[in-house]
Image (cartoon, rainbow, N blue to C red):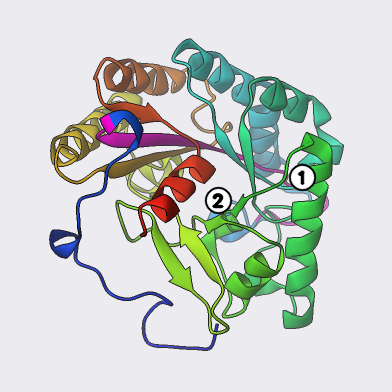
C-alpha cells in the first residue's frame, strides 16, 4: 500500500456496527497463538527480543532453545486437555531444523501462519527488493512441510513495511494478524482493490511483554487473562468478540509458568458461548458477515 495517514480500512467505532455473531451463537472466539520460532546460534538475537549481545549469545539463545526442546511440548499437553488447537506463528526455518515439532503440531490439526524465515530477521530490516522473496519462501516452505496451504501471517515483531500487505496478497494469504487494533475481524483493502482480513492479535495477553516488561507473576498473568475474558464474554452477548492469547514456548513453557495457561483455559472453557477457533476460521466468519 502507499504511505498514508490511516490504515487501508475505514475507521469503524464498535458502537456503530451491526451486531456480529459467531457460529452457534458463541459470544467469544478464542484463539491461541504459540509463537514457534527459530533463532540461529550464528546470528544475533535482536535486542527487541531480549538479546543483542555478541555472537554467539549463549544466554539469549539457550533459553529459546529450551522452548523448542521442552516448552512447546508442555504447552501442547495443556492445550490438548481443553481441546484447543493452536494457530502457530511459525518461522519457516524451523521446518528443517526441528521437524519433530511440526509433526506433533500437524498431528493435533494445528493451523500455521507465516512468521518470517527466522526470528533474527524482520521484514523491515531486509532490503526492499528482498521482502517479497522472504514472504514467498516462508509460505512455500511451511506449506510443503505441513501439507496444508498457509492462509495467514504474523510478522516477527509485528514489523511490516509499506509493501508487506501487498506481498501477503501476492501469496494468496487470507488474513494478517499484525494490526492489533480491534476485537473483531475486518477487511483491509489494498490500493489495487485486493482484500485481506485483519484478525485481532494482542499485546495485552502476550506472555513476553507480560513477564519481560510488566514483571507479572504467573498468577497475575492468569488473572489478567480471566479479567479480559470476563469483559469480552459480557460484551459478546450483543456484539461477538475475539480473544487472542499469544504465547512463547521459551516463556510460558517453563515449569513455573505453565500453570498460568492451565488455570486460564480451565476458567474460560467452563463458560458456555466460547468458540475454540483458529485464525482462518475467524477470518472466514468475518468475511461471511461482511466485515
Q: Label 2: few (<14), some or many (≥20) within 10 Å?
A: few
Quarter of the picture containing the C terminus is: bottom left
Q: Residue 30 lies in magenta, yes or no?
A: yes
Left or right, 274 with respect to 113, comes to left
Residue 40 locus on image (x, y percent): 79, 48
Residue at horizontal 13 percent and vertical 35 percent from the top:
234
- Above or below, 72 against 145 in this view is above
The residue shown at (33%, 61%) is 181
Horizontally, residue 182 falls left or right of residue 97, namely left
Q: Which mark is residue 142?
A: 1
Mark 1 → mark 2, Cα distance in angstroms: 26 Å
Q: Secondary structure at mark 1?
A: helix
Counting the numbered discs, the total is 2
10 above or below 64?
below
Residue 185 included in the magenta stretch of the image: no
Q: Is residue 68 visible?
A: yes
Left or right relative to 124: residue 141: right
Q: Position of residue 19 (x, y in %)?
A: 20, 51
Q: Which residues are magenta?
A: 25-45
**Dot in front, 1 or 2:** 1
Residue 158 point in image, percent of width and height: 52, 60
Foreground residue among 74 and 60: 74
Residue 69 visible from this viewpoint: no
Q: Residue at x 67, y 71 (%)?
A: 167
Secondary structure type for disc 2: loop
Return the mark for residue 50. Answer: 2
Instruction: Name the residue nearer the viewer: 201 or 29.
Output: 29
Instruction: Tell whether 196 sits left or right of 29.
Output: right
Question: Which comes before the other along the chain, label 1 or label 2?
Answer: 2
Amino acid at each position: 500500500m502507499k504511505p498514508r495517514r490511516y490504515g487501508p480500512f475505514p475507521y469503524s467505532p464498535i458502537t456503530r456496527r451491526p451486531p456480529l455473531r459467531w457460529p452457534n451463537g458463541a459470544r467469544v472466539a478464542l484463539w491461541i497463538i504459540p509463537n514457534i520460532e527459530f533463532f540461529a546460534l550464528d546470528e544475533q538475537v535482536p535486542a527487541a527480543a531480549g538479546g543483542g549481545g555478541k555472537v554467539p549469545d549463549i544466554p539469549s539463545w539457550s533459553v529459546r532453545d529450551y522452548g523448542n526442546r521442552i516448552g512447546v511440548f508442555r504447552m501442547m499437553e495443556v492445550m490438548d486437555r481443553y481441546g484447543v488447537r493452536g494457530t502457530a506463528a511459525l518461522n519457516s526455518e524451523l521446518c528443517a531444523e526441528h521437524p519433530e515439532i511440526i509433526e506433533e503440531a500437524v498431528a493435533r490439526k494445528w493451523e500455521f501462519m507465516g512468521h518470517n524465515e527466522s526470528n533474527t530477521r524482520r521484514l523491515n530490516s531486509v532490503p526492499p527488493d528482498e521482502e517479497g522473496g522472504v514472504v514467498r519462501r516462508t509460505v512455500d516452505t511451511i506449506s510443503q512441510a505441513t501439507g496444508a496451504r498457509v492462509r495467514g501471517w504474523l510478522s516477527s515483531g509485528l514489523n511490516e513495511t509499506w509493501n508487506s500487505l501487498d506481498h501477503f496478497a501476492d501469496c494468496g494469504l487470507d488474513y494478517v494478524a499484525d494490526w492489533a487494533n480491534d476485537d473483531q475481524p475486518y477487511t483491509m483493502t489494498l490500493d489495487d482493490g485486493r482484500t485481506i482480513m485483519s484478525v485481532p492479535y494482542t499485546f495485552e495477553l502476550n506472555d513476553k511483554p507480560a513477564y519481560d516488561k510488566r514483571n507479572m507473576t504467573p498468577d497475575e498473568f492468569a488473572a489478567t487473562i480471566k479479567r479480559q475474558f470476563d469483559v469480552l464474554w459480557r460484551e459478546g452477548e450483543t456484539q461477538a468478540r475475539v480473544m487472542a492469547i499469544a504465547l512463547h514456548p521459551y516463556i510460558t513453557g517453563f515449569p513455573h509458568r505453565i500453570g498460568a495457561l492451565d488455570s486460564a483455559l480451565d476458567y474460560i472453557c467452563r463458560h458456555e458461548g466460547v468458540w475454540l477457533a483458529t485464525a482462518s476460521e475467524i477470518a472466514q466468519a468475518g468475511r461471511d458477515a461482511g466485515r
